[in-house]
Structures are given as structure tokens and as C-alpha cells.
Image: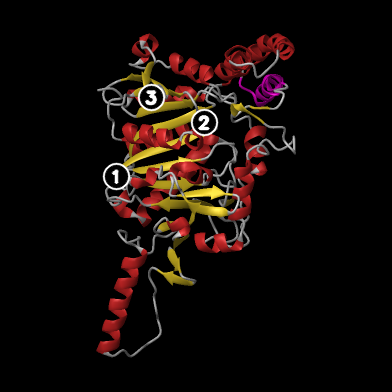
Amino acid sequence: MPSVEHKGELLPISVNNHKPASWSFKTLCIIIVSCSLLTWTIFRFSTPSQNPGFFANITTSELCESGFTYSGHIGLKGDTEEKPKRSFFWYFPAEHDAENAPVILTIGGGPGTSGLINPIFGQSPCTMTKDGLVRNPLQSQWSEYYNLVALDHPVGAGYSYGTRVNNSRDAAYDVYDFLQKFFSVFPELSKNRFYVSGGSYGGIYVPHIATVIHEQNQRHAPGAIHINLEALLVSNPFSDPASHYKWQLYYMCTVTDVYNSTTCTDLHAVLPSCLESIEMSMMSPTLENKRASMKLCEAIKEGDAHGRVIEDVRRVCFPTDPSNPLSCHPEFAWTTKVFNNSTTKSLLGVPDYVNYTSLSDDVLSDFSRNADIWHRHYLLYEPLLQSGIRVLHWIGARDANCPWPGVLSFLKLLRTPFQQEFLAAPDLSWSDGEATVRAIGAGAGNMTYVLLAEAGHFVVKDQPALAKKIVEGWIENKPWFD
């Protein structure tokens, strides 16, 4: 039974009281009026489903002076008290006409990065500082006009806990299950346009999630909620091993000088073997071949950058903990501290025994051992694009982790009705030179590539105002140029 925790109380949405009771008419009227007012206060536009038949503990809070948000856990298929499998979400209703506003599902990367990183990096009214969560001073939140649902995906990331999976396809089925239940709890949102947003390893998650949604929509299963999937937003993704490694070294040595000449010479000697091993692992996709190829190609991304931060090559940082890839990004440490605070957990409806991790080593290990990354995931976009689902890739030009040449490379390989136009199209300067745009199709495009000049791996964090401008134009399907 879903429930709402408000001001320290656990308020069940529906209660069956089997004890006989005698009520005066006056008392009954007072209770009805009080409950009506409380329901209006907690669910300003929403009446959650009664007795949904799955675990759902949903809490309201007003963190960061953001207005009411909803957060909590929803049990997924197979969830039991003894063996839980529960996804955590944080839902920021749109500030304008939330009942009819489009819904954006935002997820993390990793694999194992918390989806809550996204809202506090600029997508929501809340932002993270070393002192905790505060109101976003830039007013760049996507939730001004759109319902934003941040999901800790897959189970094991962030606050999501319980039985884990080790591949992106099974994880995508978990997301579909979550969405079916989320929309049954918030049924007024199920009719709205729906979008999926992610980056980095999200370049693998997002096409799998979109594929499962699209396939399940086509099944028309009795009782299933149709999800109105309109478009995808993918930033600085890893979607194809061959494109990534071939062009990452080019970016490190030619586009930038992240690697010095000695390192470039050494790693160029490794590159042919790396690319051959990738091809072999695709032709004979055994787990052994994939792991061997992954190990061989790792050398390319592990060259000495002499302090240059690969997520933003403009920065120099010598990590205090070389084994921690996020040690040059203090926001992740702040996030882990704040979200493990008992007060924060209470406000978000998280049991105190659930630990928060901004990057889950367990999820990372599960997916890595299964070589989930070592597939041509970008090919999933072909049937999606052919079915009319629009796809935006927006890339920070200063990122060496998932650099733009590799992304552009696999986009050019997509065999869709838009391929020839995409190959021939120029990259046009947009927004006073802040970005370039290559858009194929009407409006904002069916297949669109945007390169942000002054952003790194974390596009929204680096360019929050420009990111909001791009997102709003994309969702409203407005042409980039007059």
C-alpha cells in the first residue's frame, strides 16, 4: 500500500478499520473535511492509486524551498519483505500545470551512479553545496515546465536497494516495471508526453529503456499503461566500444594535448590491437573475448594525463585518492554525505538502514564482470528512429571521458531514413556561438546532434542556462533557427 509521510507521521492512503466504532454526524463531518484538506495539502494535483498491489512508500517534502516534491521506494517484480527489490525516485512536479506537463525520467551513468546527481546538478530547484542542499540560485531547473522524475537506476545505485541485475536490458525491464507502477500511483501523469534523459553510461541505459518501452507499448498487454514515449536526450554517452576507443585517442592527442607526445606514441601502438580485439569480440561474443578486449583497450583511457581532468580538460587536478575516479569532483562526496544524513533520509522517506552511494561499487562490478558495456548499443536507435521516436545527442566539447568525435562517429553509422541527410548536414552555429547544431527532420529534428563549446562531461552542471534552453526547445520540438 502506498503511503505518504508528512511532518513525521505515516499517513496511509487507504485504511481498512475492522473495529466497530460509533461516530457522531458532527465528528464524521469534521474528519471528512480535515482529511480533504490534508489530501489537498499533500497531493496538490494528484490522488494516488488506492491499494495498488505492490510496495510503495511515498513521502512529501519541501527541501530547498522547492515546493512539494514526492520521493520514496516502489517495489519491483519479485520484491518481498524477505528479498526486497526497490527503486527509489524523487519526483519534482512542474511549477506550471503539472497535471498536463510532459514527464522527464532522468537517470545516472556509471554503471552505478545515482540518478539523484542529475537534479542537484541543475535539473531541479535544488542544488548541492558543501553545506548541503540549497535553492538553485540560477533558476535553471527543468522542472519549471516539466515533471522531473529522478530514478536511482539500476537497483543498487543511490537509495535503490535489494536484488540486483547485471545487464542493461534486464535493468530496462525494471524501469518499465517501475514506470507502470509510478503511473498507477500518479495516474494523471500517464497521459502526458514522456522523455528519457541520461548521459555517460546512460548512453547504454537510455536506448535499452526506450526499446523496452517501445516494445511493450506495441504488445498492448491487457492492463498495461501505454507510455507516451516521444523522445530521448543523451549527453556525452558511451554507446559503442569501437567508436569510443578509436576516437578517444584522437581527441586526447590531436583535438587536445591531454596526452603528451610520448604517451600518444605509446598508445597509438596499442590502438590497432584494441580495435581488432573489439571486432573479434563482436564476431564471437563470448564473455571471455569481451573481457579480454576490455582489458586490452583500458590502456588507452589510463594514460598519464598529467593532472588534466578527463571530464573537463580545462581543469587540472591531482586526486588525493588515485583509486577514486570522482575524487576531483567534490560534489559527489558532498552528495554522499548529505544523502546519508539521517535528517535528509527522513525527509525523503528513506529508511535509516538504507545507505546512499553516489557511485555503487557493487553495481559497477556486476556490470563489468558481465561485460555489459561491450556491445554495439547504438544500433538500438535504428528501430526507434524509424518508429518516430526523436533522439537528441548533446555533447560537451571539453569532455575527454566520452569525447564528441566518438559520438559523432557512431551517429554517422546509423542506418535510418535520416542517415544521408545527417552525413551531408553542416554543424551550424547556434545561440551566439555557444553551440553548434546538426538537426535532421522537422522542428527540433528527429535525429539531432548539439555540441556545446564550453561544457565538459557534466553538461547541465557546466552550462545550466544553455542546457535548459536546449531541453525546452527539444521537448517543445521548436526549430533551432528562425
Mark 1 vs 3, N-terminal side: 1
Tag 1 residue: 192
- The stretch in magenta equals 285-303
Tag 3 residue: 383
- The residue under the point 64% across, 16% down is 257
* Whole-percent x, y for residue 88 in the image: 51, 52
Q: Nearer the viewer, mark 1 or mark 3?
A: 1
Q: Is residue 202 left or right of residue 266?
A: left
Mark 2 vs 3, N-terminal side: 2
The Cα–Cα distance between marks 1 and 3, rounded to whole angstroms, is 23 Å
Mark 2 vs 1, N-terminal side: 1
The Cα–Cα distance between marks 2 and 1, rounded to whole angstroms, is 25 Å
- Amino acid type of the residue tagged 1 in the rendering: Asn
| Residue 104 vertical placement versus 24 (above, below) | above
* Whole-percent x, y for residue 236 in the image: 51, 28
- The residue under the point 33% across, 23% down is 386
> Looking at the image, can residue 1 be seen?
no
The Cα–Cα distance between marks 2 and 3, rounded to whole angstroms, is 15 Å
* Whole-percent x, y for residue 481 in the image: 28, 22
Q: Secondary structure at mark 3?
A: helix
* Whole-percent x, y for residue 392 in the image: 39, 27
Where residue 464 sits, quadrant-wise, is top left
Tag 2 residue: 204
Q: Quadrant of the C terminus?
A: top left
Q: Residues within 10 Å of mark 1 (few under 14, many from 20)?
A: some
Q: Is the magenta region chiefly helix, strand or loop?
A: helix
Where residue 283 sits, quadrant-wise, is top right
Q: Residues within 10 Å of mark 2 (few under 14, many from 20)?
A: many
Task: Give 413 or 307, whichever is nearer the viewer.
Answer: 307
Q: Are marks 2 and 3 in contact (CB under 8 Å)?
A: no
